[in-house]
């Protein structure tokens, strides 16, 4: 079949369909898996932090165990995403690879700055301000990163997700710390998981 | 025959069609290594080189060699002309299939085009 032979119109259509499906499966990073991985981090990790602060009067902040859970989950998700992405983009080089590296470096730098700012202001601001930087800050950064990344391939679902995450992060400024972490877990993690379902549907439709 | 149906004869071969469709999955400005392309298509290096040469002669793909020794890399990408040619090819293919389904007949039954 792979020799340079004649083929009918139906055979040609089948070759196009098969080659396209195979190339998309092998060369395109699986967005549903990436969204699902980060969605679970937000939902379970931030959910655990919410459970640890629920009912605190006065608010003292999430338990060390729940914070550790977030970092462990994020570590697993980052490793999983790295494996998925590395496998898909192996052998690919060019503009999109360079853009992706810039976007990743921007996100990592932003997150590092957030951690430094959080440590620097921890003794001098209200617990609500500290909660906003710690809970909504990463969500705001993730939202802005998705908006930036969406420009790469005119990816409207990623743009919508980024916009939603920015809105949720901004709304957190009016919430009490406990409600803030719940909003990040449900509206943030939920949005990632919903995007995973939407992307799965879009991919099935495109086949 | 491909020329009679309007299907581009350079693309209209299973291996070259697979090469074109696979490269079209990449974003503009991206390229794929020869070894990854070969692995995806399951072709022998000699076979793939032959097909790439035909596509390159038509201006549909570009191959670039870089590095030396163990760092040597051959990258393959679809040109703008190639992307347009593939778009045209798939549009003609769709028209042929549509007209066949409207007529209730198989497109060119029993004839390999």
Image (spheres, coloured by chain):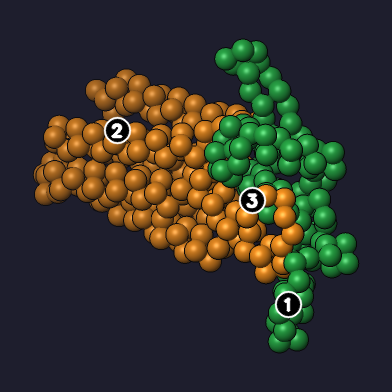
Query: Disc 2 on helix, strand or loop?
Result: helix
Which one is earlier in the sequence, the residue at label 2 or at label 3?
A: 3
A180 in relation to B46, above or below: below
Question: How packed is label 1: few (under 14 Cα within 10 Å), some, or many (20 or more)?
Answer: few
The answer to whether residue A54 is left or right of residue A176 is left
The answer to whether residue A17 is left or right of residue A57 is right
Q: Position of residue A61 (x, y in %)?
A: 18, 37
Mark identifier at residue A186: none
The residue most toward the top is B69
Using the image as rendered, state which of residue B32 and residue A132 is in the foreground.
Answer: B32
Chain corresponding to green in the figure = B
Mark identifier at residue A2: 3
- Name the residue at 85% across, 43% down: B58
Question: How packed is label 2: few (under 14 Cα within 10 Å), some, or many (20 or more)?
Answer: few
Mark identifier at residue B109: 1
**Mark 2 and mark 3: span between their CA atoms?**
43 Å
Q: Colour of chain A?
A: orange
**In front of the other: label 2 or label 3?**
3
Q: Position of residue B70 (x, y in %)?
A: 57, 15
Q: Is residue A129 visible?
A: no
**In front of the other: label 2 or label 1?**
1
> Are the residues under badges 2 and 1 in a single subunit?
no
Using the image as rendered, state which of residue A77 and residue B79 is in the foreground.
Answer: B79
Name the chain letter of the residue that bears numbered label 2: A
- Name the residue at 63% across, 34% down: B45
Q: Which residue is mark 2?
A: A75
**Mark 3 and mark 1: span between their CA atoms?**
22 Å
């Amino acid at each position: 079949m792979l020799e340079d032979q004649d083929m009918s119109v139906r055979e040609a259509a089948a070759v196009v369909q098969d080659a396209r499906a195979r190339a998309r499966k092998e060369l395109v990073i699986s967005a549903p898996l990436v969204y699902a991985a980060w969605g679970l981090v937000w939902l379970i990790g931030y959910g655990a932090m919410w459970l640890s602060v629920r009912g605190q009067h006065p608010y003292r902040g999430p338990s060390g165990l729940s914070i550790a859970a977030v970092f462990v989950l994020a570590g697993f998700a980052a490793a999983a995403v790295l494996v998925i992405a590395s496998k898909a983009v192996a052998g690919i080089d060019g503009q999109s690879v360079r853009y992706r590296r810039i976007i990743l470096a921007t996100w990592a730098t932003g997150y590092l700055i957030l951690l430094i700012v959080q440590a620097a202001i921890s003794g001098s601001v209200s617990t609500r301000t500290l909660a906003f930087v710690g809970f909504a800050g990463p969500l705001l950064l993730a939202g802005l990163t998705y908006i930036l990344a969406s420009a790469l391939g005119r990816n409207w679902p990623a743009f919508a997700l980024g916009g939603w995450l920015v809105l949720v992060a901004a709304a957190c400024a009016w919430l009490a710390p406990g409600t803030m972490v719940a909003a990040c877990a449900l509206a943030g993690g939920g949005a990632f998981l919903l995007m995973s379902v939407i992307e799965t549907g879009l991919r099935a439709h495109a086949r | 025959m491909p020329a009679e149906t309007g299907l581009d004869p350079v693309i209209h071969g299973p291996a070259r069609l697979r090469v074109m469709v696979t490269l079209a999955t990449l974003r503009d400005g991206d390229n794929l290594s020869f070894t990854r392309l070969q692995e995806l298509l399951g072709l022998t290096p000699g076979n793939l080189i032959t097909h790439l040469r035909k596509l390159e002669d038509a201006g549909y793909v570009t191959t670039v060699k870089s590095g030396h020794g163990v760092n040597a890399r051959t990258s393959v990408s679809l040109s703008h002309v190639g992307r347009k040619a593939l778009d045209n090819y798939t549009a003609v293919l769709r028209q042929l299939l549509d007209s066949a389904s409207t007529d209730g007949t198989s497109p060119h039954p029993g004839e390999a085009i």
